[in-house]
Protein backbone atom coordinates (compact mmCIF):
# COMPACT_ATOMS: atom_id res chain seq x y z
CA UNK A 1 0.00 0.00 0.00
CA UNK A 2 1.34 3.43 -0.99
CA UNK A 3 0.71 6.24 1.46
CA UNK A 4 0.50 9.52 -0.42
CA UNK A 5 1.78 12.54 1.47
CA UNK A 6 2.01 16.12 0.22
CA UNK A 7 5.66 15.69 -0.79
CA UNK A 8 5.04 12.35 -2.46
CA UNK A 9 1.96 13.55 -4.34
CA UNK A 10 3.98 15.90 -6.56
CA UNK A 11 6.59 13.23 -7.23
CA UNK A 12 3.88 10.66 -7.88
CA UNK A 13 2.08 13.03 -10.26
CA UNK A 14 5.29 13.88 -12.13
CA UNK A 15 6.09 10.18 -12.45
CA UNK A 16 2.64 9.32 -13.76
CA UNK A 17 2.63 12.37 -16.06
CA UNK A 18 6.03 11.45 -17.48
CA UNK A 19 4.68 8.03 -18.47
CA UNK A 20 2.38 9.75 -20.94
CA UNK A 21 4.91 12.26 -22.26
CA UNK A 22 8.14 10.27 -22.51
CA UNK A 23 7.98 8.11 -25.64
CA UNK A 24 7.84 4.36 -25.37
CA UNK A 25 10.63 2.58 -27.28
CA UNK A 26 8.27 -0.16 -28.47
CA UNK A 27 5.48 2.07 -29.76
CA UNK A 28 5.88 5.57 -31.14
CA UNK A 29 2.11 6.07 -31.17
CA UNK A 30 1.33 6.66 -27.50
CA UNK A 31 -1.85 8.66 -27.15
CA UNK A 32 -1.55 11.74 -24.99
CA UNK A 33 -5.15 12.68 -25.60
CA UNK A 34 -6.48 15.92 -27.06
CA UNK A 35 -7.52 18.68 -24.69
CA UNK A 36 -11.12 19.57 -24.06
CA UNK A 37 -12.42 21.22 -27.27
CA UNK A 38 -13.76 24.22 -25.34
CA UNK A 39 -10.29 25.02 -24.02
CA UNK A 40 -8.33 24.05 -27.15
CA UNK A 41 -8.47 27.61 -28.54
CA UNK A 42 -7.38 29.01 -25.17
CA UNK A 43 -4.36 26.68 -25.12
CA UNK A 44 -3.58 27.61 -28.72
CA UNK A 45 -3.66 31.36 -28.03
CA UNK A 46 -1.44 31.03 -24.95
CA UNK A 47 0.98 28.78 -26.83
CA UNK A 48 1.00 31.06 -29.87
CA UNK A 49 1.75 34.23 -27.88
CA UNK A 50 4.40 32.44 -25.80
CA UNK A 51 6.04 31.01 -28.93
CA UNK A 52 6.09 34.40 -30.69
CA UNK A 53 7.66 36.10 -27.70
CA UNK A 54 10.20 33.39 -26.99
CA UNK A 55 11.32 32.81 -30.58
CA UNK A 56 11.52 36.56 -31.24
CA UNK A 57 13.71 36.90 -28.16
CA UNK A 58 15.98 34.05 -29.33
CA UNK A 59 16.26 35.72 -32.76
CA UNK A 60 17.04 39.03 -31.05
CA UNK A 61 19.85 37.42 -29.03
CA UNK A 62 21.18 35.54 -32.07
CA UNK A 63 21.31 38.62 -34.32
CA UNK A 64 21.75 41.44 -31.79
CA UNK A 65 23.84 44.18 -33.22
CA UNK A 66 22.72 43.41 -36.77
CA UNK A 67 21.48 46.31 -38.85
CA UNK A 68 18.61 44.10 -40.12
CA UNK A 69 17.41 43.04 -36.66
CA UNK A 70 13.91 44.47 -37.09
CA UNK A 71 13.43 42.68 -40.43
CA UNK A 72 14.76 39.42 -38.98
CA UNK A 73 12.33 39.52 -36.05
CA UNK A 74 9.42 40.35 -38.38
CA UNK A 75 10.40 37.38 -40.56
CA UNK A 76 10.52 35.10 -37.52
CA UNK A 77 7.06 36.33 -36.47
CA UNK A 78 5.62 35.71 -39.95
CA UNK A 79 7.14 32.22 -40.00
CA UNK A 80 5.47 31.51 -36.66
CA UNK A 81 2.15 32.92 -37.86
CA UNK A 82 2.20 30.14 -40.46
CA UNK A 83 3.88 27.29 -38.57
CA UNK A 84 2.16 27.43 -35.15
CA UNK A 85 -1.43 27.20 -36.49
CA UNK A 86 -0.30 24.50 -38.93
CA UNK A 87 1.00 22.40 -36.08
CA UNK A 88 -1.95 23.02 -33.81
CA UNK A 89 -4.75 22.62 -36.36
CA UNK A 90 -3.34 20.20 -38.94
CA UNK A 91 -0.88 17.92 -37.15
CA UNK A 92 -3.16 17.48 -34.12
CA UNK A 93 -6.12 16.81 -36.43
CA UNK A 94 -4.56 13.55 -37.58
CA UNK A 95 -3.21 12.39 -34.24
CA UNK A 96 -2.37 13.69 -30.81
CA UNK A 97 0.55 11.36 -30.14
CA UNK A 98 4.24 11.50 -29.41
CA UNK A 99 4.93 10.65 -33.06
CA UNK A 100 2.88 13.64 -34.23
CA UNK A 101 4.81 15.89 -31.84
CA UNK A 102 8.13 14.70 -33.30
CA UNK A 103 6.89 15.09 -36.88
CA UNK A 104 5.49 18.55 -36.20
CA UNK A 105 8.76 19.70 -34.60
CA UNK A 106 10.72 18.46 -37.63
CA UNK A 107 8.25 20.21 -39.95
CA UNK A 108 8.54 23.49 -38.03
CA UNK A 109 12.35 23.33 -37.93
CA UNK A 110 12.61 22.77 -41.69
CA UNK A 111 9.84 25.20 -42.61
CA UNK A 112 11.12 28.05 -40.45
CA UNK A 113 14.72 27.44 -41.56
CA UNK A 114 13.79 27.76 -45.24
CA UNK A 115 11.38 30.64 -44.55
CA UNK A 116 14.05 32.63 -42.70
CA UNK A 117 16.65 31.88 -45.37
CA UNK A 118 14.32 32.83 -48.23
CA UNK A 119 12.91 36.06 -46.77
CA UNK A 120 15.94 37.45 -44.97
CA UNK A 121 18.09 36.73 -47.99
CA UNK A 122 21.47 37.95 -46.87
CA UNK A 123 22.23 35.14 -44.41
CA UNK A 124 23.52 31.65 -45.11
CA UNK A 125 21.36 28.55 -44.98
CA UNK A 126 23.49 27.39 -42.07
CA UNK A 127 22.70 30.52 -40.03
CA UNK A 128 18.99 30.27 -40.91
CA UNK A 129 18.82 26.65 -39.78
CA UNK A 130 20.91 27.33 -36.68
CA UNK A 131 18.44 30.04 -35.72
CA UNK A 132 15.48 27.78 -36.49
CA UNK A 133 16.97 25.00 -34.38
CA UNK A 134 17.74 27.32 -31.44
CA UNK A 135 14.29 28.90 -31.54
CA UNK A 136 12.44 25.61 -31.71
CA UNK A 137 14.51 23.69 -29.19
CA UNK A 138 14.13 26.61 -26.77
CA UNK A 139 10.37 26.89 -27.24
CA UNK A 140 9.92 23.11 -27.07
CA UNK A 141 11.81 22.67 -23.81
CA UNK A 142 10.71 25.89 -22.10
CA UNK A 143 7.13 25.42 -23.28
CA UNK A 144 7.10 21.81 -22.05
CA UNK A 145 8.64 22.85 -18.75
CA UNK A 146 6.12 25.65 -18.23
CA UNK A 147 3.21 23.39 -19.21
CA UNK A 148 4.42 20.69 -16.81
CA UNK A 149 4.91 23.28 -14.08
CA UNK A 150 1.40 24.68 -14.59
CA UNK A 151 -0.18 21.22 -14.59
CA UNK A 152 1.78 20.23 -11.48
CA UNK A 153 0.81 23.42 -9.66
CA UNK A 154 -2.82 22.92 -10.65
CA UNK A 155 -2.88 19.34 -9.34
CA UNK A 156 -0.96 20.33 -6.22
CA UNK A 157 -3.48 23.10 -5.58
CA UNK A 158 -6.37 20.68 -6.08
CA UNK A 159 -4.68 18.20 -3.73
CA UNK A 160 -4.06 20.81 -1.03
CA UNK A 161 -7.54 22.32 -1.33
CA UNK A 162 -9.39 19.04 -1.24
Image (tube, helix red, strand yellow):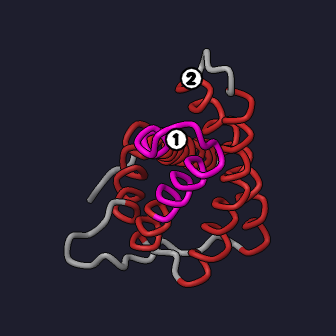
Find residue 18 and report its image quarter.
bottom left
Q: Is residue 75 left or right of residue 5?
A: right
In percent of width and height, residue 61 lies at 56, 23
Label 1 sits on a secondary structure element that is helix
Residue furthest toward the bottom? 94
Name the foreground residue: 3 vs 11. 11
In percent of width and height, residue 33 lies at 53, 75
Q: Magenta includes 97?
A: no
Residue furthest toward the top? 65
Residue marked by disc 1: 135
The answer to whether any part of residue 156 appears in the image is no
Cα separation between marks 1 and 2? 10 Å
| Crowd band around label 1 with a 10 angstrom C-alpha radius: few (<14), some (14–19), many (20+) | many
Q: Is residue 82 left or right of residue 55?
A: right
Q: How many marks?
A: 2
Quadrant for the N terminus in the image: bottom left
- Please report the residue visible at 61 percent of the width from the left and 15 percent of the height from the top: 65
- Please report the residue visible at 49 percent of the width from the left and 48 percent of the height from the top: 140
Which numbered circle lies on residue 61?
A: 2
Name the foreground residue: 142 vs 20. 142
Q: Is residue 137 left or right of residue 50?
A: left
The answer to whether any part of residue 59 appears in the image is yes
- Please report the residue visible at 64 percent of the width from the left and 70 percent of the height from the top: 35
Q: Considering only vertical position in the picture, is 43 above or below 10?
A: below
In percent of width and height, residue 151 lies at 57, 50
Residue furthest toward the left? 26
Name the foreground residue: 75 vs 151. 75
Which numbered circle lies on residue 55?
A: none
Magenta residues, start to end:
107-130
Label 2 sits on a secondary structure element that is helix
Chain-order first, disc 1 or disc 2? 2
Amino acid sequence: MLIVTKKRSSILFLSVFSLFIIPNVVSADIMIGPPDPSSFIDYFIISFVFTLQLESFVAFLYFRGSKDLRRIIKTVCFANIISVPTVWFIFTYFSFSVLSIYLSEIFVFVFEGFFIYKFIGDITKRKAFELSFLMNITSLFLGSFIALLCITLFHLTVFLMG
